[in-house]
Amino acid sequence: MEKTIIKFNGESERIDKYLASTLEGFTRSELKNYFNDQKITVNGKNVKPSYTLSNDDEICIEAREVVTLDIEKEDIPLDIVYEDSDVIVVNKPSGMVVHPAFGHYKGTLVNALMHHCTDLSSINGVIRAGIVHRIDKDTSGLLVACKNDLSHKSLGDQLKNKTTTRKYIAIVCGQIPHNLGKINAPIGRDENDRQKMAVVSGGKSAVTHFKVLERFKKFTLVELQLETGRTHQIRVHMSYIGYPVFGDPLYGPRKVYGENGQFLHAQTLGFIHPRTKEYLEFSRPAPDYFYETLEKIRNGELDK
């Protein structure tokens, strides 16, 4: 029977809540069956859904008979920005999931990386091979993957210590009056909708900085910089202050524009190379549809 190994790195959290937010398309009620069948262990021991995870806990999920875990190498074209023997930086297109999850095993970035790379780091298990950070399915832009555990640990520490550079560009709804802003609001699972995140009391610390680049009648072009990296952080924070990301089907207006999801692009990524200790920084422009839509906004075509 196939097994999935996940290395937990983070603050204390209930295992059922953590897995429900980590494994896309997998609810806490579905997880309950796995716990009842003793298919989920932590450090080799059976645990209850209420078990509180600690840093470095190793979670093992044994697939039930109704689930088949088969992570395939797939020859999917990659927009490679930088690559060496330790890391690979790719420009992920909108619509691509970063790593396989229950019910979603093919067409992901990990499937593509497994075909392209001889080795990937194993710290986060097979379903997250090489993955040290994520960007949402419908968010485009730069992401670094690791080819060995040395680089994975180094990049993981840099993310934890907030020494990486992660800048995004976004079109948001509404005209932001101030030029600069800092959003410091904790993020956790939305109690009313488990598919969403929200600003909640007792949530994980989350900090986003933003700078206005251009204002329009009903929209604003902004640059955002992450200090932390919570799930859906930019989307949740901008919605929280009243300026949701344009096109966001979860946190934006009910009427969604276009077919590419939120107009959010991970434009700049910088980090210290794990082996050479040299600071590397990469930037890539947003996809063509982003700028085509921006031009329509400039011309007032979307003001109606």
Image: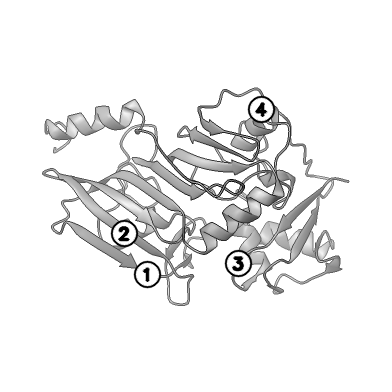
Q: Amino acid at mark 4?
A: His
Left or right: residue 279 versus residue 294 is right
C-alpha separation, residue under disc 4 versus residue under disc 3: 30 Å
Tell me if I can see residue 179 in this picture.
Answer: yes
Foreground of the two, 272 or 144: 272
Per the rendering, the mark at residue 159 is: none
Q: Assess whether mark 2 and mark 3 are in contact (beta carbons under 8 angstroms).
A: no
C-alpha separation, residue under disc 3 versus residue under disc 1: 18 Å
Disc 4 target residue: 116
Q: Assess whether mark 1 and mark 4 are in contact (beta carbons under 8 angstroms).
A: no
Foreground of the two, 241 or 250: 241
Is 149 located above or below residue 11 in the figure?
above
Chain-order first, disc 3 or disc 1: 3
Tell me if I can see residue 26 in this picture.
Answer: no
Chain-order first, disc 3 or disc 2: 3
Q: In the rendered view, how is the structure colored? A: one colour
Disc 3 target residue: 10
C-alpha separation, residue under disc 4 versus residue under disc 2: 35 Å
C-alpha separation, residue under disc 3 versus residue under disc 2: 22 Å
Is 251 located above or below residue 190 in the figure?
above
Q: Amino acid at mark 1?
A: Ala
Residue at left offset 63%, top offset 30%: 112
Disc 2 target residue: 209
Q: Depth-wise, is mark 4 or mark 3 nearer the camera?
A: 4
C-alpha separation, residue under disc 4 versus residue under disc 1: 39 Å
Disc 1 target residue: 185
Q: Amino acid at mark 2?
A: His
Q: Depth-wise, is mark 4 or mark 1 nearer the camera?
A: 4
